[in-house]
C-alpha cells in the first residue's frame, strides 16, 4: 500500500475533507481589511512628510524701507521630516536670498542699506526643520504696496512630489 492510498477520502468523491470545527473563511472581509491597512499606511506616510513636502511661507519682516521701495522678508520653514528643494520662485520682481541661517528682517540695521546687494535667487535645499529667508523688493505706489503674488515651487527630495506655496504680497502693507 502506498502513502497516497493511506489518506482518508470522503464518501461523496471530493478530494479534501474540511473539518466541521473550522471556521468559515470570509474572503471579502479579508480583502476589505487589507485595503484598509494599505490606506492607513499611505495616510501615515503622507502625514509624516516623507511623501509630500510640508513647508510654509510666512512674512518675517522688512528691510531697506524707503518712501519709494519696500523689501519684505518671507521665511520658508520646512516642517517635514525630510529636506525640501526649492525649484522655482514666480514673482513680478527679482527675488533675493538672505545668507544661510540669517533673517535680515530681524537683524541689525546694517541690512537696511544692503538689501539690494543680497544674492539673487537660485534653487536651494532647506534641511529638515530648517528655514531660509527670501527677500522680495517691492515698489511703493502712493504709500502702499500694490497687490502682487509670490509663488514658491517646492518638491520633496526623496520622491520628487511638487507643491506650490502662494502668498499675496502687499496685502495690507504700507510703505514708510
Image: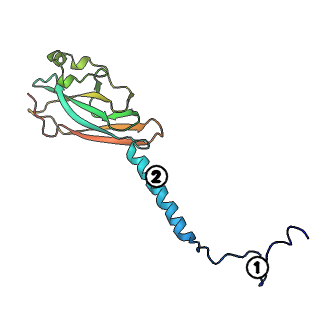
Q: Can you give x and y, in whole percent of width and height, for residue 108 in the image?
A: 16, 17
Identity of the residue drawn at 61% across and 76% down? 21
Q: Is residue 39 left or right of residue 149?
A: right
Q: Looking at the image, which is closer to me, 176 or 38?
A: 38
Q: Residue furthest right?
A: 1
Q: Is residue 19 left or right of residue 29?
A: right
Q: Quadrant of the N terminus?
A: bottom right
Q: Residue furthest bottom?
A: 12
In the image, residue 12 above or below residue 92: below
Q: Can you give x and y, in whole percent of width and height, for residue 144 in the image?
A: 11, 34
Q: Is residue 94 visible?
A: no
Q: Which mark is residue 14?
A: 1
Residue designated by label 2? 41
- Of mark 1 and mark 2, the one earlier in the sequence is 1
Q: Can you give x and y, in whole percent of width and height, for residue 173 in the image?
A: 13, 35
Determine crowd level at label 2: few under 14, some 14-19, many 20+ residues with C-alpha closer than 10 A.
Answer: few
Q: Is residue 168 visible?
A: yes
Amino acid at each position: 500500500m502506498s502513502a497516497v492510498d493511506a489518506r482518508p477520502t470522503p464518501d461523496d468523491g471530493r478530494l479534501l475533507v474540511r473539518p466541521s470545527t473550522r471556521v468559515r473563511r470570509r474572503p471579502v472581509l479579508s480583502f476589505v481589511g487589507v485595503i484598509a491597512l494599505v490606506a492607513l499606511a499611505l495616510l501615515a506616510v503622507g502625514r509624516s512628510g516623507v511623501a509630500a513636502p510640508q513647508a510654509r511661507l510666512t512674512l518675517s519682516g522688512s528691510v531697506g524701507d524707503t518712501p519709494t521701495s519696500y523689501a519684505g522678508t518671507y521665511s520658508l520653514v520646512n516642517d517635514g521630516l525630510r529636506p525640501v528643494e526649492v525649484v522655482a520662485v514666480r514673482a513680478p520682481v527679482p527675488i533675493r536670498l538672505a545668507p544661510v541661517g540669517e533673517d535680515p528682517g530681524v537683524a541689525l540695521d546694517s541690512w537696511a542699506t544692503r538689501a539690494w546687494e543680497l544674492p539673487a535667487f537660485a534653487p536651494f535645499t532647506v534641511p529638515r526643520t530648517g528655514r531660509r529667508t527670501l527677500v522680495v523688493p517691492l515698489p511703493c505706489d502712493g504709500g502702499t504696496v500694490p497687490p502682487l503674488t509670490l509663488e514658491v515651487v517646492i518638491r520633496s527630495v526623496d520622491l520628487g512630489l511638487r507643491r506650490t506655496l502662494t502668498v499675496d504680497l502687499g496685502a495690507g502693507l504700507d510703505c514708510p
